[in-house]
Image (cartoon, rainbow, N blue to C red):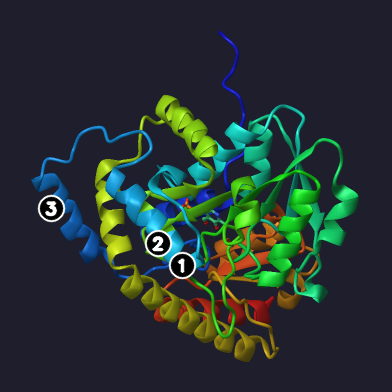
Amino acid sequence: MPQEPKFFKNSTTVAIHGLVQNLRAEGQRIYSLSAGEPMVDTAHFYKTAVDEAIEAGHTFYPPAAGIPELRRASSEWMNREFQTDYQPKHALVTGGGKFAIYLTLLSLLKTGDEVLIPSPHYLSYPQMIELVGAKPIPVPASSEKGWRLTPEDLEPFCTSKTRLLVLNSGTNPTGLVYSKEEIEAFLDFAERHDLWVLSDEVYSGLVYDDFSYFSCATPPRTRDRVAVIQSASKTFGMTGWRLGFLFGSEALIQSCEALQSQILTSTSIVSQWAGLSAFQQAEKITPMIKKTMQERRDIFYNALEKGLGVSLSRPASAFYAFLPLSLFGSSGLSDVEWCQKILKEAHVATVPGSPFGRADYVRMSFGEKPEELLEAVDVLCKWVKKN
Ligand code: PLP
């Protein structure tokens, strides 16, 4: 036999999501607090756009960088939202935000380069960085400081090999949103150390209460060293359409376009036309999803606080609760064991904290519909009391 296929670690969230779907397909009642998606009904806009695109004969290979209409609409959206001056040549349409991240890492990193990642972090960053032969350097933040880091915290982790800083304001899993001043300080730090910044802004549309979103792309001086990741998944509720975006310098976009042309050819054309309709309706769709998610956050937290008899601080963005296992009296179990136990015994699906950088935490999503959230929290709290 030739050499075995290589071993790769599965994305924990994708694996759990798959497991939930399989268990449901077997007829089991599973309460899902694991979904990384806003469960909202917006698909009628997209269905019309797809029907029209197919009717017009748009079913063949689109250009590698995306259909011109979508490159234009997405860059104009960035300009409106974040006062940038992107043109279509600064936008690349990709098969999901995740793929935009991977293309950027492939383009910017060489073997042995080091990448700073504020932690807790989105679980795929370290794996993707390792896949391109570079080294992830997580920089730990503490919950006592609201998970916030400053450039001073990054400084001791910066070496002559550091080449890129990952920022994810609107953080998965903590919901942290950095202010304008904080982002500017990180950009100054990147400039001082001559680093690229990969700014994952996929939750920029889902920011709650009095928080406002400041994009790393806004300050003109550092714009060319910033690669902005955006996605239709969360902003437009289009997770299954696999539609993401990269915004950056013309050189970066050309490099990633060439890579994409070799690896993927281009992004599904029907998803692109649906995405175009989403940008045209962005002022309706995103506020609707944001309002829905903020309501679900409060429904989820009110129920959990009541059920456990505690008071918790709420995330400023995204749709995740990142909670210490100690809150659930986990009695010596690891995060993975606890998540397995509650899935097996109470049929509640949650995600362990270790892939996000904190093995003493668990991530729960409040992206599901209110009835589902309320039932899930009820079952969870009863199970916790029994254990
Ligand atoms: N970045 C972050 C922080 C995320 O949470 C996600 C999805 O959960 C992604 C990127 C990828 O999004 P997608 O590939 O669906 O566009």
Residue sitting at x 21%, y 65%? 44
Which amino acid, by three-letter code, is at mark 2? Trp
Residue 60, horizontal then vertical, whole percent = 20, 33
* Position of the N terminus by quadrant: top right
Q: Taking 26 as reference, is 345 left or right?
A: right
Residue 77's disc number: 2
Could you say whether the residue bearing mark 3 is in a helix, strand or loop? helix
Which amino acid, by three-letter code, is at mark 1? Glu
Residue sitting at x 41%, y 49%? 87
Question: Is the C-beta of the residue carrying label 3 under 8 Å from the nearest atom of ligand 1?
Answer: no
Q: Which residue position holds label 1?
A: 81
Q: Taking 192 as reference, is 16 left or right?
A: left
Residue 26 in sight here: no
Query: Which is nearer the N-term, disc 2 or disc 3?
Result: 3
Density class for disc 2 (Cα within 10 Å; few <14, some 14-19, many ≥20) is some
Residue 86 in sight here: yes
